[in-house]
Image (cartoon, helix red, strand yellow):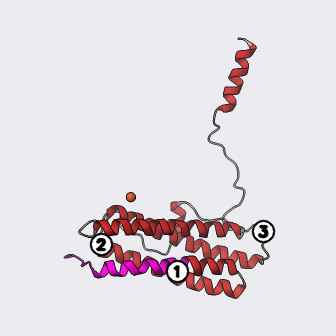
């Protein structure tokens, strides 16, 4: 085998992706890393814990919208199909903003579905398709869960001086969720539950 060929083999070996690598995690969930953002550790810790709860509930609400976007049926299909996807996109932006705020405060964001399922306060819907009024009332309840906790968290964040978290909660979470409730209320008015 020539030297030239050996070099080519070595180069190709280096280009092969290395998979199944394992190592200890570098920042365990629930632990805080202090960042120079002029906020006390206990304040960051409290905000991180609250925001992870809100994150789990927002991910669940986001996914509930996609489920209903796919599964909606009936005479209002087209409007609701579009509305549910629009709200899904807006909730996705909120998910990203909450998760990044948690990292910025020195925490670790929840991310994966099993962890979200363990944490969320929003009831799990069935796998199958439900009627429009049931879909809508599930969404309204989920919005109320989020709004209630976001308001409590916003007041607490203001009290302890975490203005960034307070602003995210009020300007983004509370306002977006309130706005999304309105078209759902009207959708519910125009639908009737079928015979049970
Ligand atoms: Fe779609």
In the image, what residue occupies the spot 74% across and 78% down?
42
Secondary structure, magenta segment, majority class: helix
The residue pinned by badge 1 equals 175
> Within 8 Å of ligand 1, the CB of disc 2?
no
Q: Is residue 12 left or right of residue 60?
A: right
Of 82 and 168, which appears nearest the observer?
A: 82
The first of marks 3 and 2 along the sequence is 3
Q: Within 10 Å of the Cα at label 1, are there few (<14), some (14-19), or many (20+) other Cα atoms?
A: few
Of 60 and 182, which appears nearest the observer?
A: 182
Provide the secondary structure element on which disc 3 rests. Answer: loop
**Which residues, given as a range, are shown in magenta?**
173-196
The residue pinned by badge 2 equals 132
Of 154 and 182, which appears nearest the observer?
A: 182
Residue 29 appears in view = yes
Q: How far apart are the alpha carbons under marks 3 and 1?
A: 29 Å
User: Marks 3 and 1: CB-CB under 8 Å?
Assistant: no
Provide the secondary structure element on which disc 2 rests. Answer: helix
Q: In the current view of this chain or complex, which residue is farthest to the left? A: 195
The first of marks 1 and 2 along the sequence is 2
Does the magenta run of residues contain 53? no
Residue 35: give its label: 3
């Amino acid at each position: 085998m020539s030297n030239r060929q050996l070099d080519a083999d070595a180069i190709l070996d280096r280009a092969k992706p290395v998979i199944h690598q394992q190592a200890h995690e570098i920042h365990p969930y629930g632990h805080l890393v202090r960042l120079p953002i002029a906020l006390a550790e206990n304040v960051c810790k409290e905000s991180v814990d609250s925001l992870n709860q809100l994150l789990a509930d927002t991910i669940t609400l986001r996914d509930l919208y996609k489920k209903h976007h796919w599964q909606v049926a009936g005479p209002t299909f087209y409007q609701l199909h579009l509305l549910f996807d629009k709200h899904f996109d807006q909730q996705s932006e909120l998910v990203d903003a909450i998760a990044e705020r948690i990292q910025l405060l020195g925490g670790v964001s929840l991310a994966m579905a099993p962890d979200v399922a363990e944490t969320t306060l929003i009831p799990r819907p069935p796998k199958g398709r439900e009627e429009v009024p049931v879909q809508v009332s599930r969404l309204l309840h989920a919005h109320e869960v989020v709004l209630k906790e976001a308001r409590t968290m916003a007041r607490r964040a203001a009290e302890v001086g975490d203005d960034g978290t307070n602003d995210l909660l009020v300007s983004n979470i509370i306002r977006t969720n309130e706005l999304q409730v309105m078209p759902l209320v009207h959708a519910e008015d125009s639908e009737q539950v079928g015979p049970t």
